[in-house]
Image: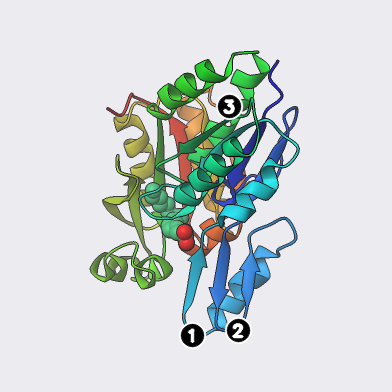
Amino acid sequence: MLICKIVSDSSSDIKSIESIPYGVAPLKIITDEKEYCDDERLNVHSMLDDLQSYKGRSRSACPNVEDWKREFEGYECVFCITITSGLSGSYNSAQVAVKEFLQEGENRRAYVIDSLSTGPENTLLIEKLQELILAGKNFDKICKEIEEYKSTTHLIFALESMHNLANNGRISPIVAKVAGVLGIRLIGKASLQGTLEMTNKSKGAKKAVSDILKNLQSNGYNGGKIRIHHCENEDLAKKLSSQITEMFPSADPIICPTTALCSFYAERGGLIIGYEGNKKY
Ligand code: X90
């Protein structure tokens, strides 16, 4: 079996995995007063509290080349998974890191996967990589199969606020205004280009759950793997999870809190769902 390390940026919300070496290249949340590094030492709840009372500007920053390279040390083979290149420079810096890594030693192998997504969809990609490596597949086969798998995974989000997304130029301020209305959740998905695409304006939690379920099914969800990440909204995550298992008894929804990057952009109350569905293109 290849001894490979999986290195994800912190947008996947996954701090550790079993059986395979794994590392995280952290993104950062930055204000004029403080920098929050998205690693296991950070208290996300107090970061959200700080940001709620902070009146100045806040932004994010992707891992730099050195952040990625630090995680490669001691390995000859690495697989990187990044947040969508459509919204972040993380994919770019991982690619530069990999280029240098390959030049600095012989017999090295490395591959960067642009998730065109974030959070729970990236989690599915990490799980798949783990499975392919453990199955003893060779490097080239793993690269090919993970790309094929990526074309069948999807992402849906349901957000109560899009303030940080709009303030940082990731969506239009006009769209964000709708999410600011009390009781309204904006439902959307990761587009083929890895940007945000809106699908519904849902009033109330119940309607949000039923709109999410409709979206899942229209993209071919049929009881396969599904991961629900939430920013301090375990209640809604559980409601959705139980509806999913009611409709698809074979489903295995796993609920997981978002870490700093996804918490910053999904904001309190937000849900992000990654799942297996139809081939995308
Ligand atoms: O490089 C950076 O500073 C990171 C920028 C990330 C910007 C957007 C993150 C969105 C996270 C929001 C809902 C899911 C949208 C997914 C669309 C592909 C979570």
Upstream in the sequence, badge 2 or badge 1?
2
Instruction: Kindly report the distance in space between the C-alpha atoms of the residues bearing marks 2 and 1.
Output: 9 Å
Inspect the image, locate mark 2, and give the three-letter code of the amino acid beneath it: Glu
Disc 1 residue crowd, few under 14, some 14–19, many 20+, Cα 10 Å: few
Q: Residue at x 44, y 39 (%)?
A: 115
Left or right, residue 9 beside residue 196 = right
For disc 3, the neighbor class at 10 Å (few under 14, some 14 to 19, many from 20) is many
Residue sitting at 63 percent across and 54 percent down?
67
Residue 219 position within the rendered picture, expressed as x and y whole percent measured from the top left: 32, 31
**Three-letter amino acid code at disc 3?**
Leu
Cα separation, mark 2 vs mark 3, equals 38 Å
Tell which tag, 3 or 1, sits nearer the viewer: 3
Residue 209 drawn above or below residue 64: above
Kindly tell me whether residue 206 is visible in this rendering: no
Cα gap from disc 3 to disc 1, whole angstroms? 40 Å
N-terminal of the two: label 2 or label 3? 2
Q: Nearer the viewer, residue 268 or 240?
A: 268
Q: Do we see residue 3 in this rendering?
A: yes
The structure residue drawn at horizontal position 68% and vertical position 19%, both measured from the top left corner, is 2
| Element type where label 2 sits in the image | loop
- Mark 2, residue position: 33
Q: Are marks 2 and 1 in contact (CB under 8 Å)?
A: yes
- Report the residue marked by disc 1: 56
Where is the N terminus found, in terms of image quarters?
A: top right
Name the residue that disc number 3 marks.
129
Q: Position of residue 96 (x, y in %)?
A: 50, 47
